[in-house]
Amino acid sequence: MDWLLTSIRINGGAGSSAYYQLLKGWSLPYPETTGYIIPTLLDYHDYLEERPLFEAAESCARWLVDIQREDGSFPAGLGGRGEPVVFDTAMILFGLTAIHQRTGETGYREAVQKAIGWLLRQLGPEHRWTAFTYVPGYEPAYYTMVVWAILQAGRIVEQHGLKEKMARIMDRYRQWINPDSSVANWGFHPDSPALTHTIGYTWQGFLESALILEDKKLIEGCLEAGMKMVEIHQKKGRLAGTYDQNWNGNYAFKCLTGQAQFALFLRRLAEISGEKVFKTVSMEWIEDLGRYPSKLPVPGAKGGMAGSSPVW
């Protein structure tokens, strides 16, 4: 948490830097990750009762409102200077929704309303997001996170038919789920193995959206996916960095962000189902991650964690 706070302080509170490099120092602030760091800062504020955590969340949120485009979208890339992207705009919704729920400030609610409007306008006639994507024309399965972000934000804004529209999109995504709980299009690129990072996004989005939509069948599918992850862990003793559509993994590296996401997914399943194995495996993954934060006595490195092990 100290590392995250430093990543914000280095920018004068105007967003969290995307990364730190030993030779180059801190990067420019990154809108997407700044957005979903805000709920974490708020949760830790509640837990530790330390005012600087709340102040950091507020300063990040104000910066995001400042860089929001007139059409409601948010820029991708570093420094808030890139073109808008559907996924990044959705991830920022998590932060703005959370800060509005804590402060009640109208400006945050208006920013959320504008962002939802832009995201809905990007839907094509078949309710697909194929514009303003990471890979032009490619709609990945991890856009389940976009659906979840909109549903979550829908709790603070009035938007007629929003849940029904998101349910239709989710009905299409669920058709990509294979019998073994792999999912078509779950990677950054079509027809390529997926990092556990995007696999984690995909299943987290399915689960949280299903809970809001009260979709019992999809929740059951998430429980099956969780059991598949447990089975892989018990068989291999660790997670691979990537998996293909047949769950064949590349064990030459670990995707640490993905492992954290898998752990969070199983922890949520444990809360929902009461299955102890989900909590047990989740904790094993979290304890393993505890070995990786940097111990270098450098402010920008100490406490930070690379995205993979080994570092690529």
Image (spheres, helix red, strand yellow):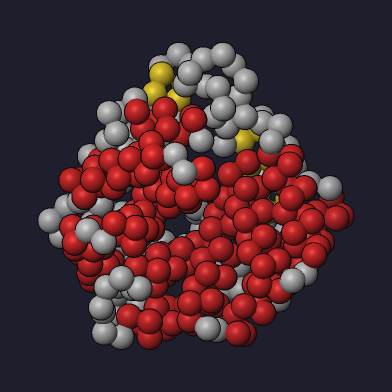
Residue drawn at (74%, 71%) of the image: 274
* Image x and y of residue 76, in percent: 30, 46
> Residue 233 falls in which quadrant of the image?
bottom right
Q: Is residue 253 above or below residue 62?
A: above
Q: Is residue 211 above or below residue 194?
A: below
Specify the farthest residue to the front: 49
**Image point 28% across, 41% down: which residue?**
59
Instruction: Choose top left, top right, bottom left or bottom right for residue 27.
Output: top left
Query: As drawn, is 73 to the left or to the right of 51?
Result: left
| 247 versus 144 height, above or below | above
Q: Position of residue 226 (x, y in %)?
A: 71, 66
Q: Is residue 157 left or right of residue 38?
A: left
Q: Is residue 173 visible?
A: no
Q: Is residue 61 visible?
A: yes
Outermost residue on the left side: it is 70
Looking at the picture, tell me which residue is in the foreground, 5 or 30: 5
Q: Is residue 220 left or right of residue 21?
A: right
Whole-percent x, y for residue 99 in the image: 33, 55
Q: Position of residue 85 (x, y in %)?
A: 31, 54
Number of marks present in the image shown? 0
Taking the spot 20% from the left edge, 45% from the top edge, the residue there is: 67
Q: Quadrant of the C terminus?
A: top right
Residue in the picture at 19% in, 61% down: 106
